[in-house]
Amino acid sequence: MADALATRGSTALARPSFIKEGDVRGTENITTNDIKFPALRLAQAMSPEVKRADPAYLAGLREGELFNSITRQVYGEEPVHLVIVNQLGHRNVEFDPDDRNVVLAGDIPDDDPRCDFTFQTIDGVQKRIKPRATRFYDYLVLLIREGVDPELMTLSLKSTQLKKAKVLNSQLKLSKLPTFAHLFKATPVPEHKGANSWYGWRFDAVGYVSEELYNLASKDYDKMQGKSVVVEADVAEVKDDDDSIPF
């Protein structure tokens, strides 16, 4: 888009001139119910895509960098700009404690015991134990980068980022405007607590979107109404030794 803001350039191959833009033959029977939206991910030290021995390894990806979960394109560590098409609510997911790639249960109700903190006596000391379920706040967003069309993606915030999700939700709600009226800058930032470190998000409100972006996001919002957006769970672990945050 002409008004997209500058970020690290795309590594995608340029479309040959003989392949006409807008020619989508062969995709007529593929609906939004038949696809999985790519997720905008922030790589952690424990992300499978960062580990060389993991089948999901993504060459060149480093912790603290952004990447696309479907195309596996690496966007780098520079800030990106987002338009939030829709705040999709939250969900509680239980993973296999021995294999975080295995989901035991999704969409667990908030009043389920698996969402509650518990207490356990270990070596004579009572410890507060995190819930078995991990809470995610999910968003449908447009990723804005210079020189390429906006990309419709999902974004999930969990664990150490839950407080940031609630601040973001508050900004959106209190504005009394459509979520897609605002342009945000999203920046990967290093965070730590005690001996543990990881990368988190910083969201800064940039201002209002252009009319072009507003109309595009509005169409995406209308198109997705009444449809289920499947958000793939991010299995990467973040450890901060804070029992107040459910993982």
Image: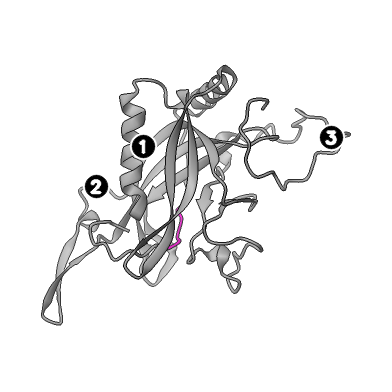
- What residue is shown at x 55% (from left), y 42% (from top)? 37
Query: What number is the disc on residue 110?
Result: 2
Circle 1 residue: 168
- What residue is shown at x 28% (from left), y 61% (from top)? 132
Position in image of residue 61 (x %, y %):
61, 60
Give the vertical position of 131 relative to 79 (above or below). Answer: below
In the image, which residues are magenta? Answer: 233-237
Position in image of residue 246 (x %, y %):
28, 57
Q: Regarding mark 3 in the picture, which secondary structure is present there?
A: loop
Q: How many marks?
A: 3
Horizontal relation, residue 146 to residue 112: left or right:
right
Disc 3 residue type?
Answer: Ile
Residue 206 visible, this angle:
yes
Indicate the quadrant where residue 56 lies.
bottom right
Give the vertical position of 42 relative to 195 (above or below). Answer: above
Q: Is 75 one of the magenta-colored residues?
A: no
Residue 115 or residue 226, whichever sits in front: 115
Q: CA distance from mark 2 to mark 1?
A: 21 Å
**What secondary structure do most residues of the magenta stretch adopt?**
loop
Tell which circle, 3 or 2, labels the residue nearer the N-terminal end.
3
Residue 179 or residue 18, whichever sits in front: 179
